[in-house]
Image: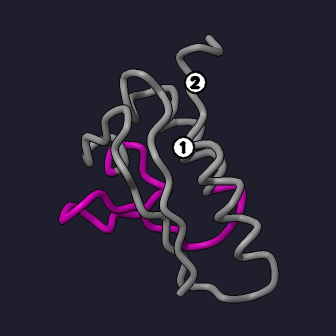
Amino acid sequence: MPTRTAVVGSRVGLHARPASLLVQAVTASGLPVTLSLGDRGPVDARSILLVMGLGARHGDRVVLSLDDTGAGADAVLERLAALVETDHDALA
């Protein structure tokens, strides 16, 4: 199972906008990605309510996991990790 650890870059954590961008990217990938934070999770990363429910804050380390080990799985996780690590609040 491929995994990636990412540090939450948005200053106010995975709130509505960053969570929405992550959920959209996961959904577009068509792959079953989960997200966990410490002992919380894993949750389905296609659900904005579940992603926001983790309560990930700026600087928290989250783990993205993928049950699919097929071609492109690592690239998908890299793109998703980059989304999590971007400060979307600075871009608004």
Secondary structure at badge 1 equals helix
Range covered by the magenta-colored residues: 27-50
Q: Tell me where residue 74 appears, x and y as whole percent.
A: 71, 74
Q: Quadrant of the C terminus?
A: top right
- Disc 2 target residue: 88
From the top left corner, tell me how far across and down residue 43 is, in percent: 34, 63
82 on left or right of 4:
right
- Mark 1 — residue? 84
Count of all numbered marks drawn on residues in the image: 2
For label 2, count other residues whose C-alpha is less than 10 Å away and answer few (under 14), some (14-19) or many (20+). some
Q: Is residue 26 above or below residue 70?
A: above
Please tell me which residue is depicted at 32% across the width and 68% down the height of the picture.
Answer: 42
Magenta-span inclusion, residue 10: no
Task: Report the colour scheme.
Answer: one colour
Q: Is residue 2 left or right of residue 60?
A: right
SS at circle 2: helix
Query: What residue is at 45 percent from the left and 40 percent from the top?
Result: 8
Tell me if 9 is positioned left or right of 13 in this view: right
- Amino acid under label 1? Val
Q: Amino acid at mark 2?
A: His
Q: Residue at x 65, y 47 (%)?
A: 82
Q: Residues within 10 Å of mark 1 (few under 14, many from 20)?
A: many
* Residue 47 falls inside the magenta stretch: yes
The tag on residue 35 is none
Relative height, residue 71 to residue 6 (above, below):
below
Query: Residue 4 falls in which quadrant of the image?
Result: bottom right
Residue 59 versus residue 55: which sits nearer the camera? 59
Q: Position of residue 75 (x, y in %)?
A: 76, 67
> Which residue lies at the image location 74% right of the left edge and 88% below the top edge?
70
Q: Toward the viewer: 62 or 41? A: 62
Quadrant of residue 91 within the rendered picture: top right
Give the percent coordinates (x, y) of residue 88: 58, 24
